[in-house]
Image (cartoon, rainbow, N blue to C red):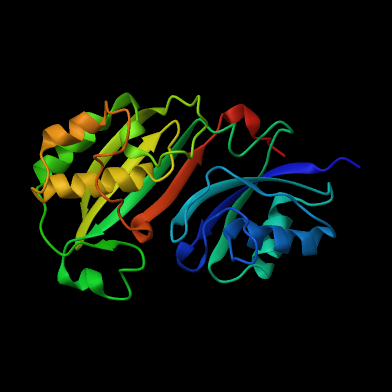
């Protein structure tokens, strides 16, 4: 009997996970979901995520595709699955999708946020789990300049981990939105693109913070946008400040019932 294809919209606190992707004898988000679904469906269920978030990275809008037996409805699957999952994973929504839906390949854009704490209280255990406690003032004009420089299409060799993309990948990404905004006690960087490379947002934030701390010049940031390697990039920002906020898909992939 044919199954039904669903999209899961997931929230998770990535602190105690070794990332998204299944790994032997290690707690991961994908592994946790697949174990819960196997119990509910009476056999293995493959969960495919829109992106492979790293260890410590959070999500408020990770998307995953699953195929489950046809008797499941979106509402019932969400309710029963949440009852099976640990406290650091939550299924916010389940959508019925067209059979060809694929969480990774069907996506048209992804949006991330990165939180930076500027005040002393950022070191509190109630905040540092979800933001980078920089603990000092930054040059806001420099951050705005860097964000504006990102807009458009670039080859991000300078802001990606070497060897994690196929040899023929051009590392080209289209940045559709990028800005820094002020929040109580700090700043948040919002960025949306058609795709992201491994560690790309964390490399971008780490480098922008050094520019805004006057440790690096704006021209160095611009040079990395045309570099063919990551030799000059700053260390990546810590994983805990990063959150996958939303994945967007064509409306035609969603079923109305």
Residue nearer the viewer, 226 or 191 = 226
Q: Residue 167: x percent and y percent?
A: 50, 28
Residue closer to the observer: 56 or 66: 56
Can residue 71 be seen here? The reply is yes
- Displayed quadrant of residue 98: top right
- Residue 226 in the image: above or below residue 113: above
Q: Who's the residue at 64% across and 63% down the image? A: 32
Q: Position of residue 226 (x, y in %)?
A: 27, 25
Residue 122 image offset from top left, x and y in percent: 23, 69
Q: Residue at x 32, y 76 (%)?
A: 125
Residue at (64% x, 31% y) in the render: 253
Quadrant, the C terminus: top right
Q: Position of residue 12 (x, y in %)?
A: 51, 61
Q: Quadrant of residue 194?
A: top left
Viewer-proximal residue, 180 or 138? 138
Answer whether residue 13 is visible to the viewer in this image.
no
- Residue at the outermost bottom position: 125
Does residue 186 appear left or right of residue 139 in this picture?
right
- Residue furthest out toward the right: 1
Quarter of the image that includes the N terminus: top right
Q: Residue at x 46, y 44 (%)?
A: 246
Is 178 situated above or below 53? above
Along the horizontal axis of the image, is 225 left or right of 106?
left
Disc tally is 0
Image quadrant where residue 187 sits: bottom left
């Amino acid at each position: 009997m044919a199954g039904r294809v669903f999209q899961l919209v997931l929230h998770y606190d990535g602190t105690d996970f070794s990332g998204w992707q299944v790994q032997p004898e290690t707690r991961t988000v994908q592994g946790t979901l697949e174990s819960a679904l196997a119990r509910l469906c009476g056999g293995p269920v493959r969960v495919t995520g829109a992106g492979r978030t790293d260890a410590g990275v959070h999500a408020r809008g990770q998307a995953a595709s699953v195929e489950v037996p046809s008797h499941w409805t979106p509402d019932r699957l969400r309710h029963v699955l949440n009852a099976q999952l640990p406290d650091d994973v939550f299924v916010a929504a389940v959508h019925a999708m067209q059979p060809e839906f694929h969480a990774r390949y069907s996506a048209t854009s992804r949006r991330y946020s990165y939180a930076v704490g500027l005040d002393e209280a950022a070191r509190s255990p109630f905040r540092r789990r979800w933001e980078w406690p920089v603990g000092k003032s930054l040059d806001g004009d420099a951050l705005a300049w860097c964000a504006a420089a990102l807009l458009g299409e670039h080859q991000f060799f300078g802001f990606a981990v070497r060897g994690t993309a196929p040899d023929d990948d051009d590392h080209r990404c289209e940045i559709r939105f990028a800005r820094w905004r002020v929040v109580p006690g700090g700043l948040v960087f919002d960025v949306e693109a058609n795709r992201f490379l491994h560690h790309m947002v964390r490399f971008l934030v780490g480098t922008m913070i050094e520019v805004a701390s006057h440790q690096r010049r704006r021209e160095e940031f611009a040079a990395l946008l045309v570099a063919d390697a990551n030799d000059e990039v700053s260390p990546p920002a810590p994983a805990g400040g990063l959150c996958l906020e939303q994945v967007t898909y064509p409306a035609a992939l969603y079923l109305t019932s």
